[in-house]
Structure formats: structure tokens, C-alpha cells
Image: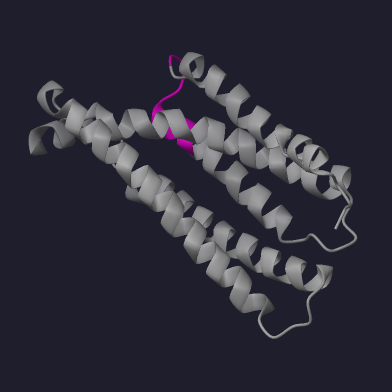
Amino acid sequence: MRGFSALEAGLAFLPLTAGIFGASRVVPRLMSRYSPRQLLGAGAPLIVAGMVWLTQISADTAYVTGLLGPMLLFGLGVGLVFVPLNVLILSGVSARDSGAASGLLQTMQQVGGSLGLAILVTVSQSASEGAAPGPETLIEGATAAFAAGAAFAVATCLVIFFGMRRGPAATTAATAEA
């Protein structure tokens, strides 16, 4: 739609990757100052904001004004969330079970990513079904998928803010269950 070559399209996604990489490199230092839950609480809303912003794209959206910002927000949010989430999940596991828990975590991330992608592609296809092929139809499907992704991200925020145990009791409870 923008007429990008394969190389230009790849470079256009570089800010997303740079946001993830940059934030994930800073997070270990931030974790000495902030709890994993606080970092999750900072990162997840950035993911929501990026996804909601992407629901506003159209066939006429310019890269710099309509795509660069949401990709940076989304990338920073993912970078802030990924490491603390892994720490929280694995912190209550006994040393004896840490290998199995880590393997299960990695498996669930792969399965979750695949399932999430399948759901979003289905949403996109359903939203553009029956319409004449063209950029507007593709954008209509993409914005529907971004809206569904934003809904998933909002659900994640609700879990972070209202569904997670707070403080040392969370680690103690998780250790006692193991």
C-alpha cells in the first residue's frame, strides 16, 4: 500500500524491534528500583495505547505520523513487560522444578503466540470477508485485528492491576504450592 520494497518494509518495522530491544536492556536495571509488577503496570498500558492507535490507520495513513508512534509504544511496552513477567512466573518455583517450569513457560509463550495470531488472522479475515479486494479491505481487516489485540491487552492490564497478588505473599503462596 505504501509501495515499500521488501527492504523498506523490513526497515519500517525496525523501530518496533528497537523498542523491544532497548526496553528489555534497561529493565534489569529498573528491576533493582521497581517491582516486576510495577514494570508490568507501566508496560502493558503502552501496549494498549499502541494497539488502539493502530486501529486508526487508513489506506492514506503516512508512516511517520500513523505507524511509527504506535510501533514505538508497542515495542517499549513489550520490552518492559517481557522480563518482569518471566521473573514473576518463575520466582515462586523451587530450584528442583525450575527447569520444568522454564520449559513450560517457553512452551506456553509459543503456543499462546500461535493461538493469538490465529485468532487475530481470523478476526481480520472475518472483518474483510465479502468485500472487494483492495487496500481499504486489507486495512479494514487489519484495524479489526488491532482492535481485538487491544482488547486482549486491556484484559492483560485488568489482570495486572486487579488479579495479581501483591507483595511477598504472592511469592510465599507460589512457593508453598510448589
In magenta stretch: residue 144? no
The quarter holding residue 145 reads bottom right
In the figure, is residue 47 to the left or right of 2? left
Q: Please report the residue visible at 48 percent of the width from the left and 35 percent of the height from the top.
A: 81
Q: Please report the residue visible at 78 percent of the width from the left and 76 percent of the height from the top.
A: 133
Name the quadrant of the N terminus.
Answer: bottom right
Query: Residue 139, image x and y in percent?
Result: 76, 66
Q: Which segment did they paint magenta? A: 32-40
> Compared to 21, does 12 lie above or below?
below
Query: Residue 6, image x and y in percent?
Result: 78, 43
Name the quadrant of the C terminus.
Answer: top left
Q: Nearer the viewer, residue 93 or 49?
A: 93
> Compared to 17, does 164 lie above or below?
below
Q: Nearer the viewer, residue 52 or 122?
A: 122
In the figure, is residue 134 to the left or right of 108? right
Q: Is residue 132 something one can see in this rendering?
A: yes
Q: Please report the residue visible at 67 percent of the width from the left and 39 percent of the height from the top.
A: 73
Query: Residue 123, image x and y in percent?
Result: 57, 71
In the figure, is residue 53 to the left or right of 113? right
> Compared to 32, does 97 lie above or below?
below
In the figure, is residue 17 to the left or right of 12? left
Query: Residue 60, image x and y in percent?
Result: 90, 60
The quarter holding residue 91 reads top left
In magenta stretch: residue 33? yes
| Name of the residue lying farthest toward the front | 6
Q: Is residue 93 something one can see in this rendering?
A: no
